[in-house]
Image (spheres, rainbow, N blue to C red):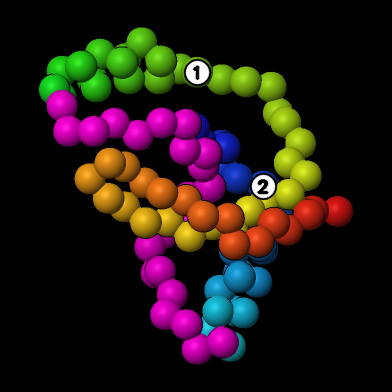
């Protein structure tokens, strides 16, 4: 689910994370940052089924919501799906 063009604070947060990772000597993911929420993932399957679902639900929208924290998670992909381990929760003021 997209978050529109993204609040400027999301981009400032990403920049601060990148700066901290660089200072720590970590490799960065240099892909374009697109704020979003992952609502679901789909396994290999029929492209037609996915296409139909996207046509039916692509216009989903909701009222703005407040985010009180963000979680830093470690992700591990396997044949059974993604496994996420919470590393740290960061409250937002």
Task: Report whether residue 11 is seen.
Answer: no
Residue at position x 48%, y 60% in the image: 74
Closest to the observer, 75 or 36: 75
Instruction: Please tell me whether residue 39 belongs to the stretch shown in magenta.
Output: yes
Q: Which mark is residue 60?
A: 1
Query: Dividing the picture into quarters, in which one does residue 17 lie?
Result: bottom right
Give the magenta-colored segment's residue range: 24-45
Tell which of 36 and 26 is nearer to you.
26
Mark 2 closeness class: few <14, some 14–19, many ≥20 residues within 10 Å: few
Q: Position of residue 3 (x, y in %)?
A: 57, 37
Q: Please tell me whether mark 1 sits on a helix, a strand or a loop.
A: loop
Residue 29 drawn at (x, y percent): 40, 69
Q: Main secondary structure of the magenta part?
A: loop
Whether 75 is drawn above or below 24: the answer is above
Label located before the other in sequence (1 or 2): 2
Q: Position of residue 82 (x, y in %)?
A: 36, 46
Which disc is residue 7 wearing? Answer: 2
Q: Secondary structure at mark 2?
A: loop
Position of 88 relative to 30 (above/below): above
Q: CA distance from mark 1 to mark 2?
A: 19 Å
- Up the image or down, 64 lies above or below 87; here it is above
Name the residue nearer the viewer: 93 or 4: 93
Tag 1–tag 2 contact (CB < 8 Å): no
Q: Residue at x 58, y 88 (%)?
A: 23
Task: Answer with left or right where residue 52 lies relative to residue 16.
Answer: left
Q: Who's the residue at 67% across and 47% down the image?
A: 7
**Viewer-side residue, 31 vs 49:** 49
């Amino acid at each position: 689910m997209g978050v529109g063009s993204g609040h400027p604070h999301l981009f400032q947060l990403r920049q601060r994370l990148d700066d901290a990772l660089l200072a720590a000597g970590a490799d960065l993911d240099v892909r374009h940052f697109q704020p979003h929420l992952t609502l679901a993932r789909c396994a290999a399957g029929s492209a037609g089924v996915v296409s139909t679902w996207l046509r039916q639900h692509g216009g989903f929208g909701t009222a703005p919501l407040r985010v009180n924290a963000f979680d830093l998670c470690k992700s591990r992909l396997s044949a059974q799906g993604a496994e996420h381990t919470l590393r740290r929760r960061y409250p937002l003021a």
